[in-house]
Amino acid sequence: MATFEAALVAGRTQVVIANIRWDRFREVYELRGPTELLRQMPARGPAAARQGHPPLSRQLSTLPPEQHADCIRRHVEAVVAHVLKLPEGQTVSRQTGFADLGVDSLMAIELRRRLSSDLGVALATTLVFDYPDCERLAEHLQAQWAEAGKDVPASPEATGATDADTEAEAELNRKLSQLGI
């Protein structure tokens, strides 16, 4: 309702707000092949996961502990740059706040989901607000990794992280309201 209210206040009269599980929608919608409708959406799912670099959890499990902090920091910076759609090779300052970089609520959700998936641990919905820059976020993720204490963590699906979306979105909306966003 808050999103509808914001659209009305902004004077937008033709708005659709929907809670869509795009990965599931895409899988069914494109059973007969790729479509123009979803052409610009990045591929997701098991096939996409096999294509790129191994998840952060696998990289960390192959490195000595003294290299974890640097690996996580570089990964966080790369994910933030990706979420911000920065040109290839452009980096993000470790200490510049996410709000100052233009990270909005949808980007915050994407950032949390990607880091959760890459690290293989459930992360708080308020992650980006609690750790508002790359440096603090990387330190927190390193602590999460150390606390998990496992070589290759279970996927977020196995931990139930993706099934808590409704509760997570409610918490995110509360944080956004507090920040006036």
Image: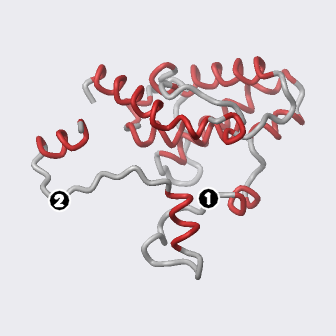
Q: Please identify the quarter of the rendering in which residue 129 is found.
A: top left
Q: Please identify the quarter of the rendering in which residue 63 is found.
A: top right
Question: Helix, strand, or loop for circle 1?
Answer: loop
User: Residue 7: image x %, image y %?
Assistant: 18, 45
**Disc on the earlier residue, 1 or 2:** 2
Q: Which residue is denoted by mark 1 in the rendering?
A: 44
Name above or below for residue 110 compared with residue 146: below
Q: Which residue is denoted by mark 2 in the rendering?
A: 14
Marks 1/2 in contact by CB < 8 Å: the verdict is no
Q: Residues within 10 Å of mark 1 (few under 14, many from 20)?
A: few
User: Residue 170: image x %, image y %?
Assistant: 39, 30
What amino acid type should be assigned to the residue bearing mark 1?
Arg
Residue at coordinates 37% horizontally, 38% vertically from top-left? Answer: 104
User: Residue 66: image x %, image y %?
Assistant: 84, 21
Q: Residues within 10 Å of mark 2 (few under 14, many from 20)?
A: few
What amino acid type should be assigned to the residue bearing mark 2?
Gln
Residue at coordinates 61% horizontally, 58% vertically from top-left? Answer: 44
Name above or below for residue 120 compared with residue 13: above
User: Residue 15: image x %, image y %?
Assistant: 22, 56
Residue at coordinates 47% horizontally, 23% vertically from top-left? Answer: 132
Quadrant for the C terminus in the image: top left
Q: CA distance from mark 1 to mark 2?
A: 29 Å
Question: Helix, strand, or loop for circle 2?
Answer: loop
